Amino acid sequence: MKIGLLGLLTFETIYPLSKRFTHWPQAWLSFDCAWGLPVAWVAVNDSIDWRLVSALVVGIAYWTIHFDTIYVCPDKKDDIHAGVHSCALLFGDYIRPILSFFASIFVLSLAYAGYENQQGPLYFTVTVAGTAAHMFWQLTRPNLEKEGTKICT
């Protein structure tokens, strides 16, 4: 548990500063979000299923990059002015296909985790297919390319 707390505090400390030194601050946030899963798993179980936990950690990481990049899209103009970086700025005109890749990895990780955990058809229908449909909606609905626009138009 001590190493879990140390990792969490490290990622939480670095994340706000990462906008100053990397174009991937959303990746730092994803480490912060995903770090808790293996720590919680070990706290609840005596052993760790690395295949299942790894799939979920990867999924959380890719999902975090996906949603936080969408979240920062309206701030692109301000970020340029402030001299900070983000995945939204890095991806530029290719933001939608790159976010599609991240969303796809997230959905595939959910499917693999369900397979590893021997989930039934309801899991794959509701969780995996439902998530895929929602990711599609997230990628087609907002205007991600224009700077300073509301993304939920």
Image (cartoon, grey):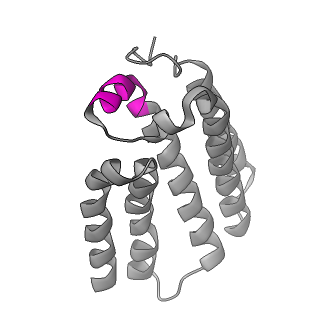
- Considering every residue shown, the one lying at the far top of the view is 153
Report which quarter residue 140 is drawn in: top right
Where does the image place residue 95, in percent across and percent down from the top left? 59, 31
- The residue lying at 68 percent from left, 42 percent from top is 101
The answer to if 77 sits in the magenta stretch is yes
Front in this rendered view, residue 10 or 103: 10
Q: Is residue 1 visible?
A: no
Secondary structure character of the magenta stretch overall = helix
- The residue lying at 46 percent from left, 82 percent from top is 45
Q: Is residue 48 above or below residue 118?
A: below
| Numbered disc total | 0
Q: Is residue 49 above or below residue 52?
A: below
Front in this rendered view, residue 130 or 35: 35
Q: What is the quadrant of the N terminus in the image?
A: bottom left
Q: Is residue 85 visible?
A: yes
- The residue lying at 62 percent from left, 45 percent from top is 102
Report which quarter residue 51 is drawn in: bottom right
Q: Is residue 13 above or below residue 96?
A: below
- Looking at the rendering, the stretch of residues picked out in magenta corresponds to 71-81
Viewed as shown, does residue 86 lie left or right of 94?
left
Where does the image place residue 125, in percent across and percent down from the top left? 71, 42
- The residue lying at 49 percent from left, 46 percent from top is 65
Where does the image place residue 100, in percent across and percent down from the top left? 66, 36
Where does the image place residue 71, in percent across and percent down from the top left? 40, 32
- Considering every residue shown, the one lying at the far bottom of the view is 46
The answer to if 25 sits in the magenta stretch is no
Viewed as shown, does residue 48 lie left or right of 77?
right
